[in-house]
Image (spheres, coloured by chain):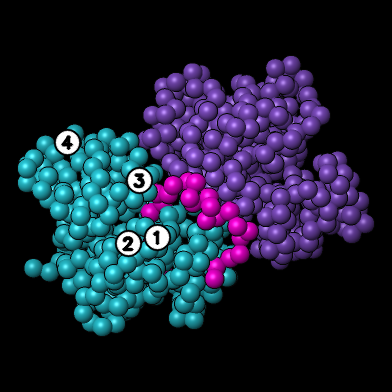
Chain colours: A cyan, B purple
Amino acid sequence: MTQQLEDVLAARIRIRPFIHQTPIFQSQTLNRKLGCDVYFKAENLQKTGSFKARGVSHFLAMLPELPAEIATYSSGNHGQAVAWAAASRGCAATVFMPEDAVLAKVDAVKHYGGQVRFAGLTTQDRFEACRDYAAASGATMIPSYDHDAIIAGQGTVVLEVLEEIPQFDALLVPTGGGGLLGGNSLALKSLRPHCAVYACEPALADDARRSLESGTLTSVAFADTIADGTRALCLGDRNWALIKQFVNAGLIADEDAIMAALKDLAVYLKLIVEPSGALGLACLAANRERFAGQRVVVILSGGNVNLATYSKFTAGEHAGSA
Amino acid sequence: MTQQLEDVLAARIRIRPFIHQTPIFQSQTLNRKLGCDVYFKAENLQKTGSFKARGVSHFLAMLPELPAEIATYSSGNHGQAVAWAAASRGCAATVFMPEDAVLAKVDAVKHYGGQVRFAGLTTQDRFEACRDYAAASGATMIPSYDHDAIIAGQGTVVLEVLEEIPQFDALLVPTGGGGLLGGNSLALKSLRPHCAVYACEPALADDARRSLESGTLTSVAFADTIADGTRALCLGDRNWALIKQFVNAGLIADEDAIMAALKDLAVYLKLIVEPSGALGLACLAANRERFAGQRVVVILSGGNVNLATYSKFTAGEHAGSA
């Protein structure tokens, strides 16, 4: 059965004890530069540094009883969220990560007490390794986006936004596997049908845009972008079912625009945001005419960076958004 | 007459329409590293990127009528606050800055519509230039720290803290001219006499510590630190009158500890903080034994950085606090 609004509303109540209600920021200077009224929902300040804490918290809250061990596969932020959620509830966690995972994200999984296992480079590689491990060990497997409980948990972001900003024109959502987009587009369109929702992707990994334009779930062959959190080659099936129903269009930003957005977020909002997390601003800056004069909500989905790499991105003289 | 608690309480009501009530953040990971329970008051997210917006807003709120022009002298953050406050109230602003001011701070003053004039390298140079200019032009001069209205405005930070964190053991305050420290130590000791207050300075500009240890207002000859907001060579007279009465001691951090604090704030709190703004954390990390097991409030006083310079500080592999 397709997800309903009530699943997201219930998720909010279920996960509230575990997560932060993240703040929403504005910059008058950025508003002037962009020609619209922008609200930034700072999920980079969420527990574990990304919105992933919501979905995982909801997955665990829906289980009839806590398992002895949970296992997952993740390029990073979801893995951190699983390790953190497991530790805070007293169960073990094993996270299958790609061999080229961002070091800071590997360290963070370990830091939260999770066990890291490396498995290939693709989502398929680590999915299979995790599935086999879970079958052998009896661990409960937590998927990273293609699951109803995860999607409903991620969708709670926009419920918090609506409490503070009851009326706005558009929501911009960084999109990888589509859990954040699926849950939030479902919730927003159910409550504010006239509000537009956009998938925000790197130009180098624009599978959601291609899917929306063709009307058919479409993969990309490569996703070699600095936005490492959006390297999923394809939306999940459950996510796509929601996205094709509730999302207006896909927007893209090139790599330079993503770096310019990182800089603007540092200079004007004083926030460290990871490249994937800056996609909403990058796509907004690349599509100013579309949003001129509008009230726009941008989800900053995460802030987990390797500081040395991040510093390279921000080291050039600040040139503003593309 | 010396400042009273009621001046700070009144200031809070006067400036509330103009400023942000800034958020307070925690990091469980930093708490574990530091061995205490730390609350970070994020004045880097204040209007204009520093606490200086408070003092200036209060100075203007105390004037019987708004002048046609205001003028000030500042190495940066105070100047931005003056330019912003002037623009938002429809009066002109002229800011005298040192010739070696951080470019991002100069640009920000101009961005807010302020006129920048350069005057020498020392506080005395720009004070005299500003005084002469004000005498000739009729502009109202706003001092950067040694003024009762400014001090009372800055002291409102800890009133906001007490609303959210009613009970804590110590307050750590970055200290340059002493406006932030004077106002907040007055307010805190008047309301929570058993709470300790510390001046936090770079080891290279430790005039407040020297003054507190000797009991006599003491200057330093140079202040060549990356913490450019604390390069004042001496506390103001009015600030010192409060500081000697209400501050427990001065703490210092070396330049490496300041850079390590910048990194920790980026990695664990996802916040861009300027070197001066990170002094509270740097001094806490350098004095862990003193604060072991305590509940500590650290004021992050500002976040205005030249992003290229900041990125150099954060570019090394993250090594944690000193």
Image quadrant where residue B151 sits: top right
Residue position marked by numbered label 3 in the rendering: A105
Camera-side residue of A103 and A92: A103
Residue position marked by numbered label 1 in the rendering: A227
Dots 3 and 1: beta carbons under 8 Å?
no
Mark 4 — on which chain does it sit? A
Tell me which residue sits at (42%, 39%) in the image.
B26
Q: Which amino acid, mark 3?
A: Lys
Dots 4 and 3: beta carbons under 8 Å?
no
Residue B297: x, y in percent? 49, 33
Residue position marked by numbered label 4 in the rendering: A91
The label number, if any, that marks residue B102 in the structure image: none
Residue B280: x, y in percent? 56, 33
Q: Is residue B111 above or below residue B169?
A: below
Residue B74: x, y in percent? 76, 47
Image quadrant where residue A117 sits: top left
Q: Residues within 10 Å of mark 3 (few under 14, many from 20)?
A: many
Horizontal side of residue B236 vs A321, given as left or right: right
Mark 1 — on which chain does it sit? A
The label number, if any, that marks residue A231 in the structure image: 2
Image quadrant containing the C terminus of chain A: bottom right
Dots 1 and 4: beta carbons under 8 Å?
no
Dots 3 and 2: beta carbons under 8 Å?
no
Indicate which disc, 4 or 2, sits on the residue closer to the N terminus: 4
Dots 2 and 1: beta carbons under 8 Å?
yes
